[in-house]
Image: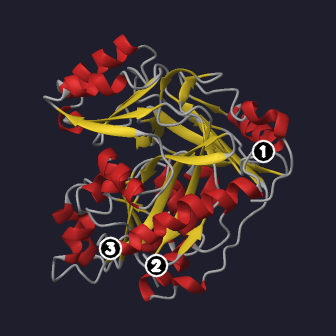
Amino acid sequence: MMRILILGSGGRECTFAWKLAKELPKENIFITPGNAGTAAYGTNLNLSILDFEAIGKFCLDNAIDTLLPGGEDSLVAGIRNYFESNENLKHIYVFGPDKTGALLEGSKEFAKKFMAKYGIPTAKYQSFIKGEETEAKAFLKTMNPPYVIKADGLAAGKGVVIPETLTEAENCVDEMLGGQFGQASSTIVIEEFLKGIEVSFFAITDGKDYLLMPEAKDYKRIGEKDTGPNTGGMGAVSPVSFVDETFKNKVIEQVVKPTMTGLQNEPFGYRGFVFFGLINVEGNPFVIEYNCRMGDPETEVVLPRLKNSLSEIINKAKNGTFSEIVPQLDERFCTTVMLVAGGYPGDYEKGKTIEIGSVTNSIVYHAGTKITDGKLQSNGGRVIAVSSFGETMNEALDKSYSSIKNIHFDGMFYRKDIGKDLQSKFIRCKG
């Protein structure tokens, strides 16, 4: 039976552990570094997700046969390459892309070139390096505001700026290429601004075949009505009411299939999750970004709707029988509301005592939590995700908000308008 090590400490990894604990003995599940919630589903470790040597040693000492990186950092750093190039570790199955495949998320320029090569719809763009500030500003003048300027590399979710005026955009070019995000902004990508509504699609692949998972819509801004600075995500809903069969078919034919063709054609050795960050522009999908892993908090609404066994999916990918999988999805709505620390995404305090009363109609996924001296405490900006099912989105949201009344920590904040932008379309929607 599978013995698996999950890398990460957030709500996404807690959801992975929750899902796997329904399928595997608790003693077969390990999480590093994990959080107070993941400890209920497996064994937490104290290993850095970038300490490949220590991770490899633990895997050998504890008969781990599967490694599941939750976030992008270890994938972009090449953890799969490390395992596959080590004679003692290469038998351990790393469910994620190699270092080159992870560049779909690790480099905006790489992703844009991939999309152009395979005819995948995306915004017009050009990339620039330090010394090309003049050319970048000239390119800005060929477009109408607002503008989209991205640091090419990973910038902890802060590397995308949308200036409203040409002057702001030109200043942004100088700041980014001047080292605002370090090496991550040594190259920048400037894109045209696409007006529409965003939605996320997800697929699992063994490198040949793929399983399309439920779509989701997340809410990035800290304030209600999508105001204030971006966060890691304040909530999510699935399914998404404006994703009808016509739009979904366009996504599959114009985005998913050509992406999978590209992943097979290129020497990526790609497997694992593919996150398609899309925008619906007048009924047509355009790719904003790829991620080489699941999103967070989208995982907290997508994975609960997946009835298939996650461990079985991974095993079938490993054994070459992935094509046998028949997707089984829960047709109900699932929503999640994120409870965050006061001050987030700016300065915030950790170590706040968390009280969780009786929560019976929702699933509580821990994100930034820890146990100190026997007490549950906050340990991050995004602290807890509260997920619920319902026959309608309203019913699911009502359950989440009702459950939140039984959770408390000093400074706790959450958005009270998750899903409200979709209220006019509160219909039963089959995913």
> What is the total number of numbered labels drawn onto the structure image?
3
Across and down, in percent, residue 401 comes to 73, 34
Residue 180 visible (yes or no): no
The residues bearing labels 3 and 2 have C-alpha atoms spaced at a distance of 10 Å
394 lies above or below 276: above
Give the label on residue 269, or none: 3
- Marks 2 and 1 close (CB-CB < 8 Å): no
Report helix, strand or loop for mark 3. loop
Disc 2 to disc 1, C-alpha distance = 35 Å
Question: Real-space Cα distance between discs 3 and 1?
Answer: 39 Å
Residue at numbered disc 1:
396
SS assignment at label 2: loop
Give the amino acid at mark 2. Answer: Lys
Residue drawn at 30 percent across, 52 percent down? 110
Where residue 89 appears, as percent x and y from the top left, is 22, 78
Question: Any mark on residue 208, and which?
Answer: 2
Seen from the viewer's position, the closer of residues 7 and 200 is: 200
Of tags 2 and 1, the one toward the viewer is 2
Residue sitting at 52 percent across and 30 percent down? 340
Q: Residue at x 76, y 46 (%)?
A: 241
Residue found 24% across the figure and 30% down from its top: 181
- Which tag is nearer the camera, tag 3 or tag 1? 3
Q: Amino acid at mark 3?
A: Gly
- Residues at discs 3 and 2 in contact (Cβ within 8 Å): no
